[in-house]
Image (tube, rainbow, N blue to C red):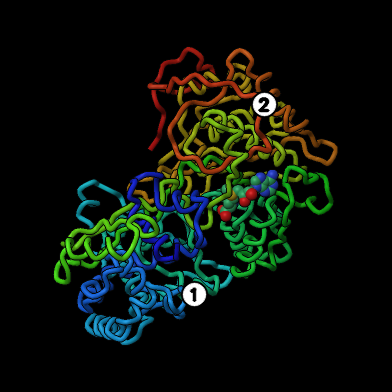
Amino acid sequence: MSLYYEAAALLANPEKTGGSLKSRLFKKKDLKSSPGQLYALITEASKWSPVLKNVIEKSGVLAEEKKLTPILALLLTHDVVLSKNGVAAAANHVLKLAINRHKARLTAEFTKARVRAGFPTINAFREAVNNGEFEEEDEDEAARGVIRHPRWVRINTLTTSLKEQLSTTFAGYTEASSLQDILSSRGSAKLYFIDAHIPNLLALPSKIDLSRNAAYLAGQLIMQDKASCFPAYLLNPTPEDGDAIDGCAAPGNKTTHLAAILHSQHHDGRRVFAFERDALRAKTLEKMVHTALADQIVTVKAAHDFLASKPTADEFANVGAILLDPSCSGSGIVGRDDVLKIHLPSTSSTSTPTARGSNNNKKRKRGADKPQDTTTSSPTTLRLPLDNTTIPEQEEEETSDTETATAKTLSDRLTALSTFQLRILTHAMSFPAARKITYSTCSTHFEENEGVVLRALAWKTAKRRGWRVLRREEQVEGMKAWGRRGEVEAEKLERLGGRVLDGVEDVEGVVEGCVRCEKGTGEGTMGFFVAAFVRDDGLAGREDVDTYPLHETDSKAGEALEADDQEDEWNGFSDDNDDVNVDTKTTPSSTTAPPTTTPSTTTNPTSNGNTSKSKKKKRRNK
Ligand SMILES: C[S@@+](CC[C@H](N)C(=O)[O-])C[C@H]1O[C@@H](n2cnc3c(N)ncnc32)[C@H](O)[C@@H]1O
């Protein structure tokens, strides 16, 4: 089956099964074409479809070429008029022959469409299409109350400044007075909003595409969700903090942000050590560090496991600040283009369905290698979910089959992930000179967030070394002002067990110190969590390095946890949320099926941390 038949079959999806386009595409084992090539063809053709639909209708190609369905005509026309190499098929391929018979007419109609729309060059036309300027307003979306996600752009102050970008890249843009203006604007309107919490961060309308913009390509602009900017900003490394570590760095958004903050303080010689365990992802990290001009500050520890690093190594003697953003369930992640919308050319003015049907029956085996045509005789818009798993650019992590199989249920996965996250956090706490740590996830689950924070605080070595959560009133301005704080659910808190809670003073203050973001709100962020730890006068010195009991071996990790909480076994909760990342290196040796009770009520923790019988109110300070 050719690229075009395969792409058309994926779009038509006659069985209406298999989830989003992305999941069907990447799960399908029998594809002849590469998933990447198919994905690019489908998404590009969909972007151009408001234009190509008219080009095809005007050319009359569907009336003459009985082998072409509207979907095939769209895909082929896209490549005829827009792909440098034309149709990707052998010269004598039936589809190539069919579409090329109309090449001159299609190209002429395409040029007319460009000129009519007022674009002098194909590049200008392309930019407008990429920005969604030909898309009609989506009334369905408005009716469903869908909240758009802005395109967040961090100005990379390693190489430029906000002022410079506003007078160059965004010179033709208008400043919006609120984020709401961005969220409610047409997808591609040329507006920007200067964020009130994070310095050097802009919000743009969702459809603005800067992927070919010179400033973006030169590393001056970094596409980074607002929430993802919180950790480096909250860490607030000062010159006195010396060097910094990013323990889980790829693809490098937070690493380069950290480097930019260090750079802004004009204290030469300070370094960021960026660990990345996965060799392939480390390559992406290296590339990003290089593009962002952060090489002078960042040392990439490629294919290095942060957990295997030696806190007492000379190299880390001046590491005062550590940023940790470990693998997580990804339940807070939002997709950018959840729905693919394709405008298909009408066949009505060109041929009747009957004529097409009888002709087709003679010429080919229906359903064998050709997808069913889902169009009718009137103009059709095809909508299909593009991405259920909602993995954004740059944040995606691979989850292998073995990993998925190992941690079958969400609660198993949360247990495994939180065990691993706790290990990472407590390892960081044992760096002799460390005075500041941020711990973050793009998860919305208590188990991976406040749960990990509370368990780390209860670790006796953390207490001995003086680690505590940075209180809200001590935080940098933007984070202090951010209203969405930690949450505690009574039942989950109870499951942490007495030993954890008795060991933590002022649970309420801890939770208030934690910062949360929620997806799908007017704040325009993904779901996210971050907490900062500090220590003022805890024991320091190289001899004082200790490890959390979980470090013994991977397989002991789960057992160690259970030993902590024997009476109130804690296995996480059943939930239908997204699943993205599983770190099976930390999978407990045995996992128990969790109770499926989802807490309907939550509690306000008391300041002595004794919540075991406290009643049920969800805590959220806004
Ligand atoms: C959530 S991603 C980090 C995203 C990154 N902070 C950013 O903002 O661009 C987690 C990364 O940590 C890496 N990782 C997981 N465990 C690690 C470990 N023990 N040592 C080093 N890297 C690790 C994963 O391979 C993954 O690339």
Residue 457's spot in the image, x, y percent? 63, 30
Q: Is residue 81 above or below residue 351?
A: below
Give the amino acid at mark 1: Ala
Q: Tell which of 242 and 209 is nearer to you.
A: 209
Q: In terms of image quadrants, where is residue 418? A: top right
Q: Nearer the viewer, mark 2 or mark 1?
A: 2
Earlier-in-chain disc, 2 versus 1 = 1
Residue 508's spot in the image, x, y percent? 50, 27
Q: Secondary structure at mark 1?
A: helix
Q: Tell which of 122 and 214 is nearer to you.
A: 122
Q: Quadrant of the C terminus?
A: top left
The residue at the far front in this view is 362
Residue 547's spot in the image, x, y percent? 76, 33
Q: Is mark 2 within 8 Å of ligand 1?
A: no
Q: Is residue 565 above or below residue 257?
A: above
Q: Is residue 598 above or below residue 28?
A: above
Mark linked to residue 558: 2
Q: CA distance from mark 2 to mark 1?
A: 47 Å
Give the amino acid at mark 2: Gly
Q: Residue at x 59, y 40 (%)?
A: 582
Q: Tell which of 520 and 553 is nearer to you.
A: 553
Residue 606 appears anywhere in the view? yes
Mark linked to residue 215: 1
